[in-house]
Image (cartoon, grey):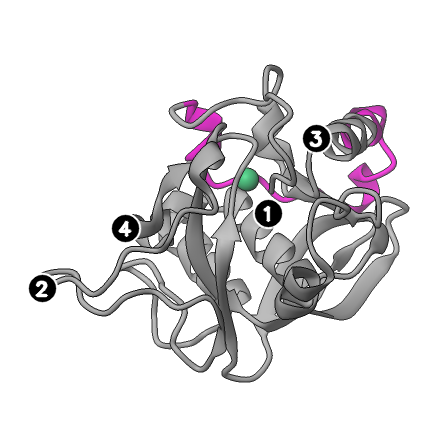
Amino acid sequence: MIDAARGARDVVQAGAPALRDVARAVDVDEIDSTEIQELIAEMLRVCRARGVGLAAPQLGARRRVVVLEDTTEGMSDETSEALAMKRREAFRAKVIVNPTLTPIGDASAAFFEGCLSVAGYRAVVRRHLRVRCRGYGGDGKPVDFEAVGWEARILQHEVDHLDGVLYTDRMESRTLRRVDLLDEPLPGDHPEFGEAVVLGESTAPVRRGPGASAAEDVEARVKARKNRKK
Ligand code: ZN
């Protein structure tokens, strides 16, 4: 996920097939391979330079690896009020291999987000406010943690990339705008498209794909999809 508009030349852009395929899991004993370690190092470099999160398919690698990091410096262009509303707090770099997310509770949050692979645009996306993340670290050790607010949003955005999903698939489409128009007012109610989008937390449901089951469990969905392919 993007933090600030700093260009996006070496990150593959929407339209690239790598962004639409379901990425392949990494065997645990493959994590310390040169291929995966070099991939992780490059992902961390790109993420630190340009955003707050990155998924391997964005570098053209169809593997289930994400990285994320948010720094005080990176959020310095946001007011303390905005940071509090988004529950955005600095956290150290995380590498997660084969991440699975499980929403916690019914709360969701609607805020603008962007993507290094959809350069120059932003739209409001409703995401789960809290998620539990399980997977493996870059050192091959299991990780299991809960995330809230902006970190939870970044996780959901990046894990979506591993399933070939872009934020534009989940966005409130009428809020899409060029990044230089980010602060313009949100569109109002519309006779066809319904009520105006309101930023912030609520219990409104998160937008899901037409093929998604009732279970709000990303892991179950990925497994179901894999089984269908067999
Ligand atoms: Zn993205």
**Callout 3 secondary element:** helix
Horizontal side, residue 94 vs residue 113: left or right: right
Q: CA distance from mark 2 to mark 1?
A: 33 Å
| Residue farthest to the top, as pictured | 9
| Residue farthest to the left, as pictured | 191
The residue carrying pointer 3 sits among few (fewer than 14), some (14 to 19) or many (20 or more) residues within 10 Å by Cα, namely many
The residue carrying pointer 2 sits among few (fewer than 14), some (14 to 19) or many (20 or more) residues within 10 Å by Cα, namely few
Looking at the rendered structure, the kind of residue marked 4 is Arg
Horizontal side, residue 102 vs residue 75: left or right: left
Q: What residue appears at the point 29 percent right and 50 percent down from the top-left corner?
A: 173
Look at the numbered disc 1 and say if its residue's Cβ is closer than 8 Å to ligand 1: yes
Which of marks 1 and 4 precedes in the sequence?
A: 1
Looking at the rendered structure, the kind of residue marked 3 is Arg
Q: Quadrant of ligand 1?
A: top right
Q: Is residue 104 above or below residue 28?
A: below
Instruction: Write down the residue under mark 2.
Output: 191
Instruction: Write down the residue under mark 3.
Output: 50
Q: Find the magenta span and give its range.
A: 16-40
Q: Position of residue 22 (x, y in %)?
A: 47, 41
Quadrant of the frame with the N terminus: top right
**Callout 2 secondary element:** loop
Instruction: Write down the residue under mark 4.
Output: 174
Which of marks 2 and 4 precedes in the sequence?
A: 4
The residue carrying pointer 4 sits among few (fewer than 14), some (14 to 19) or many (20 or more) residues within 10 Å by Cα, namely some
